[in-house]
Image (cartoon, rainbow, N blue to C red):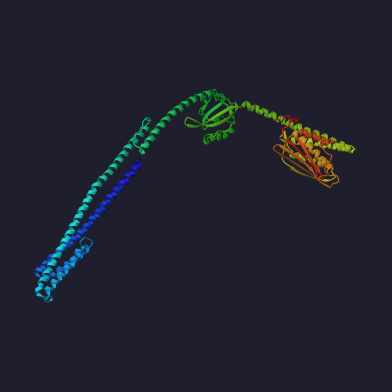
């Protein structure tokens, strides 16, 4: 049972016993007081009856008038006393006796005061004697009843007092037993607390072998068990801590051995102050020993332009506990030589303090090689730009020569053929022009090329109809070995539409769309002209333009579909956007 439950039960029983004792004492006291009050009333009645008896005897003996007033006062007082004992036994006897006494006394008084009141002298004395006898007997009866009532009240008082003493005799030991229980519980609590205090002091002083022993199953016993369990866990924890510390020291020694053998820079610093540096770091910095660097600031060795960046990374490690990203720093050795180090830092515990472990790899040779490579790439970029520029110029010269040849020729068929060839050369020249103007020599935005190419075709061909060009073009990046065949296909299809689709028509429209979905390029060229002949097909194509288209489709590994009717012709070309190697593409990979 817990101390709380035990104390609650004892307290409840003690309070109950107290209330029972108090209630009993209060009840018996009230009863005794009631009996004493009744006794007082009965005694007063008996006293008045006794005095009335004396006055009656004196009046009957001396027949003096002075006794009448006293007798009447006593009788009235007796009547009042009678009303106060109406709740007692024998009240009927008292109630019947008092009126009889009054009547008998009144009869004697009248006979004495008025001799003529009763004429029969012979019976008058007999009547008076009977009246006197009646008064005496009734008064004696009243005295007897009042004495008996008085004795009964006294007996009841004695009985109540005896009951009170008896029950006190029982209740007082019970209360004493509760007091004993309270004292016992108090003593047990004090002893338990003393044991707990002594045991905790021993444990607090480091005696983890000490155990607290308290019998029972109360809170103190449970607390003692908790303390014992805590001491055992603490002992085991300290044992494990010692083992871990020993293991950590062994790991520290192994780590120091490995670190000393590592040619990289390994530094442990606290807020930038060097606490440890390995042999590899000493060699990289150009010091004679680690003692020359301990206590110095890492910012002393970093180029001034990178100091703020280094400070921010130190704060990131120390204040936020984050691992930094690898960063290249330009470091100056003690002998003045500059080296490049790729450095990364992470938070660690160094002793009892938060520190940062910094690992740096000397990448000076790599940086030097990268700079040389960058210079070489810049030279190649200039060379490629010059090549594209020259190719574009040469193609422009060829195109110009064909244009002059066509202007001098009188053969219309030859003019058309020269014009077609000129457009094909211009298509290729536009690709090289875009590459020359671009920073990227491997890919170009084909959307820009389509609009420029179609504009050139429209300006070159003198169509009989007014042709409107609608564009729905997305940004599609193509390398040169796909861009040139695709440009030539657009040239052939748009040229063919401009020449043959709008015969005898005043207006026409050509719609060109370009999009890429999941690395698949979709090119659509549609006109609203007269359509193709029913016998048209790529398998039996007999024109140079269609044979060129067929060859270019094979080169792109594309598919081409067409639909033709009264509403015009629609060509749909689909191919995969890939890095195609070939002449002029050796630099892509």
Residue 442's place in the image compared with 513, above or below, is above
User: Residue 74, image x and y in percent?
Assistant: 16, 66
Q: Residue pushed farthest right? A: 410
| Side (left or right) of 553 relative to 66 | right
User: Residue 367, image x and y in percent?
Assistant: 63, 28
Q: Is residue 529 or residue 85 the one in the foreground?
A: 85
Q: Is residue 387 or residue 347 the one in the foreground?
A: 347
User: Residue 515, image x and y in percent?
Assistant: 72, 40
User: Residue 223, image x and y in percent?
Assistant: 37, 37
| Side (left or right) of 249 relative to 566 | left
Residue 554 visible: yes
Count of numbered tags: 0
Q: Quadrant of residue 234?
A: top left
Q: Is residue 172 or residue 552 the one in the foreground?
A: 172
- Which quarter of the rendered picture does the N terminus lie within? top left
Residue 421 visible: no
- Which quarter of the rendered picture does the C terminus lie within? top right
Q: Quadrant of residue 371?
A: top right
Q: Quadrant of residue 41?
A: bottom left
């Amino acid at each position: 049972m817990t101390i709380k439950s035990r104390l609650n039960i004892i307290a409840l029983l003690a309070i109950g016993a107290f209330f029972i004792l108090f209630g009993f004492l209060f009840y018996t006291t009230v009863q005794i007081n009631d009996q004493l009050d009744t006794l007082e009333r009965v005694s007063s009645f008996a006293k008045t009856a006794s005095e009335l008896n004396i006055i009656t005897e004196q009046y009957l003996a001396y027949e003096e008038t002075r006794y009448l007033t006293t007798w009447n006062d006593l009788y009235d007082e007796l009547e009042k006393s009678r009303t106060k004992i109406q709740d007692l036994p024998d009240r009927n006897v008292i109630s019947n006796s008092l009126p009889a006494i009054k009547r008998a006394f009144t009869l004697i008084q009248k006979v004495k005061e008025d001799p003529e009141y009763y004429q029969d002298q012979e019976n008058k004395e007999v009547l008076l004697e009977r009246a006197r006898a009646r008064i005496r007997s009734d008064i004696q009866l009243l005295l007897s009843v009042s004495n008996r009532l008085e004795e009964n009240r006294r007996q009841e008082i004695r009985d109540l007092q005896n009951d009170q003493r008896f029950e006190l005799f029982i209740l007082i030991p019970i209360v004493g037993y509760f007091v004993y229980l309270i004292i016992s519980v108090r003593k047990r609590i004090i002893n338990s607390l003393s044991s707990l205090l002594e045991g905790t002091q021993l444990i607090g002083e480091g005696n983890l072998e000490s155990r607290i022993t308290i019998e029972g199953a109360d809170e103190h016993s449970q607390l003692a068990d908790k303390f014992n369990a805590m001491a055992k866990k603490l002992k085991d924890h300290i044992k494990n801590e010692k083992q871990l510390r020993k293991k950590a020291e062994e790991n520290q020694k192994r780590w120091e051995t490995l670190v000393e053998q590592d040619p990289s820079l390994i530094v442990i610093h606290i807020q930038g102050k060097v606490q440890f540096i390995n042999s590899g770091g000493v060699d990289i910095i150009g010091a004679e020993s680690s003692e020359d660097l301990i206590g110095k600031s890492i910012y002393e060795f970093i180029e001034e332009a990178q100091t703020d960046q280094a400070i921010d990374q130190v704060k990131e490690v120390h204040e936020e506990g984050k691992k930094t990203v690898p960063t290249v720093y330009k470091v100056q050795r003690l002998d003045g030589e500059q080296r490049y180090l790729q450095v990364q830092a992470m938070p660690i515990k160094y002793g009892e303090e938060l520190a940062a472990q910094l690992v740096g790899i000397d990448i000076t040779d790599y940086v030097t090689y990268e700079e040389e490579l960058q210079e070489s790439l810049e030279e190649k970029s200039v060379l490629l730009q010059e090549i594209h520029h020259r190719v574009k110029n040469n193609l422009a010269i060829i195109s110009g020569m064909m244009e002059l040849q066509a202007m001098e020729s009188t053969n219309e068929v030859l003019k058309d053929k020269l014009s077609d060839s000129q457009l094909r050369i211009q298509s290729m020249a536009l690709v090289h022009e875009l590459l020359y103007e671009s920073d990227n020599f491997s890919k170009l935005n084909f959307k820009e090329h389509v609009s420029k190419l179609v504009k050139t075709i429209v300006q070159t061909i003198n169509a009989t109809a007014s042709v409107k060009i609608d564009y729905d073009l997305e940004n599609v990046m193509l390398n040169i070995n796909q861009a040139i065949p695709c440009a030539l296909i657009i040239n052939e299809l748009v040229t063919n539409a401009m020449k043959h689709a709008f015969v005898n028509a005043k207006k026409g429209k050509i719609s060109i769309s370009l999009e890429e979905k999941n690395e698949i390029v979709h090119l659509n060229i549609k006109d609203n002209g007269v359509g193709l002949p029913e016998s048209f097909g790529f398998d039996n194509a007999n024109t140079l333009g269609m044979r060129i288209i067929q060859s270019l489709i094979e080169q792109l590994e594309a598919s081409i579909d067409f639909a033709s009717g009264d509403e015009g012709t629609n060509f749909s070309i689909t191919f995969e956007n890939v890095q195609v190697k070939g002449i002029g593409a050796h630099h892509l990979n």
